[in-house]
Amino acid sequence: MSSSTTQTTVPITFGQPFKAGNWPSAQGLVATDSTGASVPLQVDQIASHQDGSVRFAVLSAKVSNVQANQPRLINLFLGAKSSTTQTIPADPDWNLELEAKVYNGNTLVSTLVAKPQEVLKQNIAQGTNRRLNGSVATEYTVLAPFKNSATNEAHPHLNARLHTRLYDNGARIRTDMVIENNWTFKTGPGNITYELTVRKNGQVIHTQPKFTHNHHARWHKVLWTGATAPQYRLRHHMPYFLASKATWNFDLSLRIPESVLAQEARDLSASDTVPMGRAMLNPYFPSTGGRPEIGALPRWTVLYLLTQDDRARASMMANADASAGVPVHYRDEGTGQPLDVQRNPNVSVLFGTSSPALPAVSGSTIWEPDTPHQGSFAYIPYLLTGDEFYLDEMMFWASWNIANVHPTSREAGKGLIYENQIRGQAWGMRSIAEAAFAVPESHPQKAYFKTILANNLTWYQANYTNNASISPLGAIENRYEAGRAVPWNNDFMGIVFSWMAENGEPKSQDILNWFSRFNVGRYIAESDGFCTVKAPGYYWYIRDTAGRQITTWRELFARNYPEAVNKPCANLTMNVEAYPATAEGYAAISRAALASAVNAGVSNASTAYTRWKGFTPLIDAAFLNDPTWAIVPR
């Protein structure tokens, strides 16, 4: 960590993934700094690997005597568990008041007020709604309804969730103020136009000018009260972060040019980052063509992982925040958690297909979300920060992807998502796996996402690895056009299932091995009649003209490239859609899929990756400008 100012003590909270087996759950964690001095450390919000060791934890540390512009290393070691907690006052000097003036056009229709101090005092007294608790930080989620100042009636939809983190025995308080308009079953959902003023002890500390809050959406703002807010910048040891397999192994040897990061900052500066703003996202998800959010991770997230540059971080966090404005956030009033199809087996966020029927929405937004063109918006921000806002975001997107499938197709409470485009299945499974992997073991939604993930893997195993009626070459047949396959969509599936297999998720390795017959096999089948140069195709036939499954590489090549039959492979050119000199074409996607397969231990994947890398040397330079698909073997 580092700071631009000298500070006596700096409390910090962050997320940290761990390699399987590195941290047995029976042991604790201790910290020292670069001088060897002990650093007070607390551990919260643990998620576990398959072997029971710690996969991820939210850590809080207190660093002393921080000098301006002098980096300080924080080293973590196994040690004894600690149960030390700080002393929290029964009535902290917090005293926030939120005032929302609600408008219909330019006409003020009501003034709403939320006064959360009494709720915080109750949480402290009863130890309820507490997320972090130790010697450094104590955090409560304070639920504060907005009430009409004239009638004292609670607003049916607008509410605040205040993630209130107390440091230094309550002398410093960090409040992540989250404003939500996202109940699932309450009648009359719609957009709400308001302006917001936040006061502490009557003094204004934040104002949000009038804007329209989308239905089923949320936004947040971090506020500090009390003693001076700590000033610091924390960076992770990225080689270990990636080695933990919390995400894919992006190429840390890439040296991203200054010009790329400067342009990222300019693009962000020119974007709309106010609440409900789109930032750099495309509001029309089904839009064709490549987009920076579409990849194993979005472009801006990969830029940050490779550089940990503040400009890339700002872009990543702004886009994660913008995704909160997309109307996919359905919170169940009965549980206080994102919508759960086990609890509501016939519910659907596709209006008209739900039982019980969801209330009709008034008002429109700029957004048209879907699953096939969806980015991973909040997963890495949560792993980096440990903030509840991003944990909830991650769960909301996974929950929506499940509930967006017709109840009959998903087999009601099983939550199956196969009734999707292939790329929709890939990104949907990614979102479910993100939640299943990162949600803390103690969280009420942990079992839900783990079960939904297991249900889907059981389905894939039964319908692919144990199904003799489908492509023996391992191609996934398009559900909406029999006899066709989309090779690059198959690569997306391979990338996601490789990540799950790396993390030891049961059944994922068998399924990946089946997908890899096609994803790996087509790059090493030249001696069997399939020219490697044609491997990154757009849309292929996988059945013959009589509707029978194609069983050999030679037949597959002839069916899709009849003009190239009997021509030397060396004389053929790559398909236009491969774009072998760019970072976003199918050639680059294939590199990512093959590298992912190598990391998951797929047979012959290393040979295929090395061979394809030799076919596409220009992609390496292109990755310097856009590293979205720059996944490499570990």
Image (cartoon, helix red, strand yellow):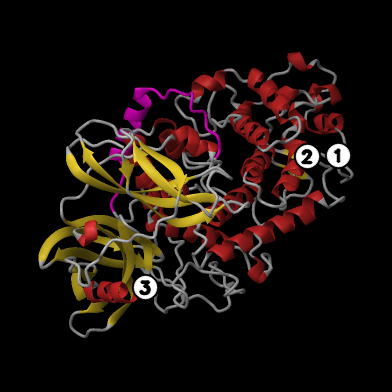
Q: Decide which of tag 1 and tag 2 comes sooner along the chain.
A: 2
Relative to 125, does residue 86 appear above or below in the rendering? above
Mark 3 sits on what residue?
128
Image coordinates for residue 608, horizontal then vertical, percent: 71, 26
Mark 1 sits on what residue?
550
For badge 1, the amino acid type reads Ile
Mark 2 sits on what residue?
541
For badge 3, the amino acid type reads Thr
Q: Secondary structure at mark 3?
A: loop
Q: Is residue 154 visible?
A: yes
- For the magenta stretch, what is the residue range? 248-274
Q: CA distance from mark 1 to mark 3?
A: 60 Å
The mark closer to the camera, 2 or 3, is 3
Q: Is residue 252 magenta?
A: yes
Q: Using the image as rendered, state which of residue 245 and residue 134 is in the foreground.
A: 134
Specify few, some or many for label 2: CA neighbours under 10 Å numbering under 14, 14-19, or 20 or more.
many
Q: Residue furthest bottom?
A: 151
The mark closer to the camera, 1 or 2, is 1
Image coordinates for residue 52, horizontal then vertical, percent: 59, 54
Relative to 161, does residue 474 appear above or below in the rendering? above
Tag 1–tag 2 contact (CB < 8 Å): yes
For badge 2, the amino acid type reads Tyr
Q: Image quadrant of residue 221? A: bottom left
Q: CA distance from mark 2 to mark 3?
A: 58 Å
Image quadrant where one finds the N terminus: top left
Image quadrant where one finds the C terminus: top right
Q: Residue at x 77, y 49 (%)?
A: 482
Q: Is residue 340 left or right of residue 485?
A: left
Q: Residue furthest left?
A: 203
